Image: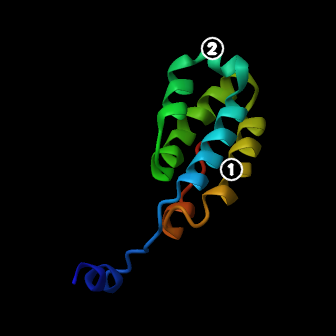
């Protein structure tokens, strides 16, 4: 019955895939980089230990702020936009349409 109610309410079903989450996590850690790990170890730890796509999606705001501080806003926007395709299929489309941090 829950599944029926969710579909009536327009709740999108997504499946958790450990491999997809690991791929997204690795991409975010690469964007954060060694300088990021040294300058913002808390964010590095958060990215390293996050185990679901939705939490990684919300961690983009902190990654955006970090990249803006260490580089510049255009760099941060390009970096985060490069992540968006990786999240397809791991999150509801409604969440993927949400605003970009900084936009």
Residue 32 at least partly seen: yes
Residue positioned most to the top:
38
In the image, is 35 to the left or to the right of 3?
right
**Residue that appears at 47% across and 66% down:** 15
Q: Which mark is residue 69?
A: none
Tell me whether circle 1 and circle 2 mark residues in contact (CB < 8 Å). Answer: no
In the image, is 46 to the left or to the right of 71?
left
**Residue that appears at 31% across and 78% down:** 6
The percent coordinates of residue 41 (x first, y second) are 55, 17
Say which residue label 1 marks.
Answer: 83
Residue 103 at least partly seen: no
The percent coordinates of residue 39 (x first, y second) are 63, 14
Q: Which of the 4 quarters of the picture holds residue 13?
A: bottom left
**Residue that appears at 57% across and 67% down:** 89
| Element at label 2 | helix
Q: Is 87 situated above or below 101?
A: below
| Element at label 1 | helix
**Residue that appears at 60% across and 30% down:** 65
Q: Quadrant of the N terminus?
A: bottom left
Say which residue label 2 marks.
Answer: 39
Q: Residues within 10 Å of mark 1 (few under 14, many from 20)?
A: some
Q: Is 16 situated above or below 10?
A: above
Marks 1 and 2, how far apart at CA: 22 Å
Quick one: label 1 or label 2, which is nearer the N terminus?
2
The percent coordinates of residue 25 (x first, y second) are 60, 41
Q: What kind of colouring is applied to the model shown?
A: rainbow
The percent coordinates of residue 40 (x first, y second) are 58, 18
In the image, is 81 to the left or to the right of 56?
right
Q: Residues within 10 Å of mark 2 (few under 14, many from 20)?
A: some
Q: Which of the 4 quarters of the picture holds residue 28?
A: top right
- Residue 48 or 87: which is nearer the viewer? 48
């Amino acid at each position: 019955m829950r599944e029926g109610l969710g579909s009536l309410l327009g709740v999108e079903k997504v499946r958790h895939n450990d491999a997809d989450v690991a791929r997204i996590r690795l991409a975010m850690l690469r964007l954060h980089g060694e300088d990021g790990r040294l300058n913002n170890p808390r964010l590095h730890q958060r990215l390293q230990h996050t185990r679901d796509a939705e939490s990684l999606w919300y961690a983009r705001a902190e990654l955006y702020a970090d990249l803006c501080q260490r580089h510049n806003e255009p760099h941060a926007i390009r970096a985060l936009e490069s992540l968006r395709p990786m999240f397809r299929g791991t999150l509801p489309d409604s969440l993927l349409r949400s605003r970009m941090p900084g936009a």
